[in-house]
Image: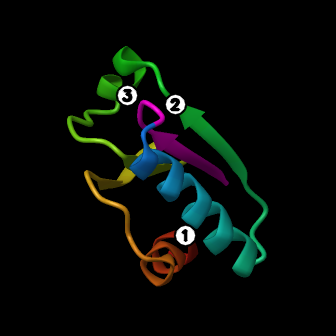
Amino acid sequence: MKIQILGTGCAKCQKLAKQAEDAAQELNLDYELVKITDIKEITSFGVMMTPALAIDGQVKVSGKVPSIDELKRILAA
């Protein structure tokens, strides 16, 4: 599973990356965390608000930092 964090590196982007990693570890997932900071690459996902979370290239969340419980539900689906 590839967990992609889309954002420029702001505090919310960093928080989303940390919480997504924590959620993946709690679920014992085999994952790769990738941070995408290039604006052109971010917009190629169709994302207009950061931070955003994509799983294997599919955007799941945009413009907010979900709770760890929400992230677990997203990652487990």
CA distance separating discs 2 and 1: 18 Å
Residue at (56, 53) in percent of width and height: 17
Residue 75's disc number: 1
Q: Position of residue 71 (x, y in %)?
A: 48, 72
Judged left or right of residue 30, residue 24 is left
Judged left or right of residue 67, residue 29 is right
Give the residue type at disc 3. Answer: Ile
Q: Position of residue 26 (x, y in %)?
A: 71, 80
Residue at (25, 33) in percent of width and height: 46
The crowding category of the residue bearing disc 1, from other C-alpha atoms within 10 Å (few below 14, some 14 to 19, many at least 20), is some
Give the answer, above or below, for where 20 lies relative to 67: above
Residue at (23, 41) in percent of width and height: 49
* Quadrant of the image occupied by residue 23: bottom right
Residue 36's disc number: 2
Give the answer, above or below, for where 10 lies relative to 23: above
Residue at (45, 19) in percent of width and height: 38
Q: Position of residue 61 (x, y in %)?
A: 33, 57
Q: Element type at marker 2?
A: strand
Callout in the foreground (3, 1):
3
First in residue order: circle 3 vs circle 1: 3
- Residue closest to the far bottom: 69
Give the residue type at disc 1. Answer: Leu
Q: Is residue 53 visible?
A: no
Q: Position of residue 7 (x, y in %)?
A: 41, 36
Asked if residue 5 lies in the magenta stretch, the reply is yes
Q: Are marks 3 and 2 in contact (CB under 8 Å)?
A: yes
Dot 3 corresponds to which residue? 42
CA distance separating discs 3 and 2: 7 Å
First in residue order: circle 2 vs circle 1: 2
Q: Are marks 3 and 1 in contact (CB under 8 Å)?
A: no
Q: Element type at marker 1?
A: helix
Q: Tell me which segment is drawn in magenta.
A: 1-9
